[in-house]
Amino acid sequence: MPNKRDLKLDDYNISKFAYRELSNFCLQYPEKKRKIADLHNPLKCQQYSDMPHGIGVGEPTAQAAERAAELSKDCELIEQAAIATDSTMYQYILLSVTEDIPYRYLKALKNIPCYEKGFIKMRRQFFYLLAKKKGMI
């Protein structure tokens, strides 16, 4: 993250490295949504070949369902933290933290209905709520 400044979250008892972990967790949101869609794809089937595989009995459907549930839980955590931060601004918060879109671009593209200082305060509160939901603080 050479061109991105870290948020100061010392007031919320979140260190610089914990913030980076939370930020990177949020940046994985679109990838997780894509993987969930792939796991729920009914046209996806098991690939068979003449090459031998593992010894144990596999349950690909159960493993896919467990993985989809885990990814859905992560996405819900992010969404719930955004809604808990501000229910009217949560879609802007989600865009900002999951797509790494700065306030000035949100203002230009989406005409966000708040000032920059207020939005940065909401982002800080979002990361605090996310850290609480993840059990980091």
Image: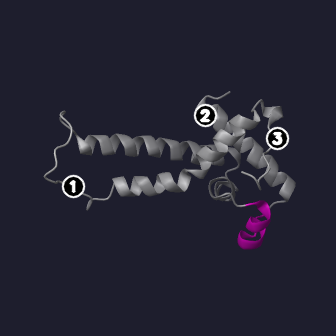
Q: Helix or strand or loop: what does disc 3 sit on? A: loop
The residue lying furthest to the bottom in this view is 109
Q: Nearer the viewer, mark 3 or mark 2?
A: 3
The residue lying furthest to the left in this view is 50
Q: Nearer the viewer, mark 1 or mark 3?
A: 1
Distance between mark 1 and mark 3 Cα atoms: 48 Å
Residue 38, by quadrant, is: bottom left
On the image, numbered disc 3 is attached to which residue? Answer: 8
Q: Amino acid at mark 3?
A: Lys
At horizontal 75% and vertical 67% (from top left) the residue drawn is 105
- Residues packed near mark 3 inside 10 Å, few (<14), some (14 to 19) or many (20 plus): few
Membership of 4 in magenta stretch? no
Viewer-side residue, 20 vs 72: 20
Residue 89, by quadrant, is: bottom right
On the image, numbered disc 2 is attached to which residue? Answer: 133
> Please, is residue 118 above or below residue 107 in the view?
above
Residue 25: image location, x then y, percent: 59, 44
Distance between mark 2 and mark 1 Cα atoms: 38 Å
Membership of 106 in magenta stretch? yes
Q: Helix or strand or loop: what does disc 1 sit on? A: loop
Q: Which residues are magenta?
A: 102-113
**For this view, does 120 lie left or right of residue 24?**
right
Please say if the residues under marks 3 and 2 sit with CB atoms less than 8 Å apart.
no
Q: Helix or strand or loop: what does disc 2 sit on? A: helix
The image's colouring method is one colour
Q: Amino acid at mark 2?
A: Lys
On the image, numbered disc 1 is attached to which residue? Answer: 47
Residue 51: image location, x then y, percent: 16, 49
Q: Amino acid at mark 1?
A: Gln
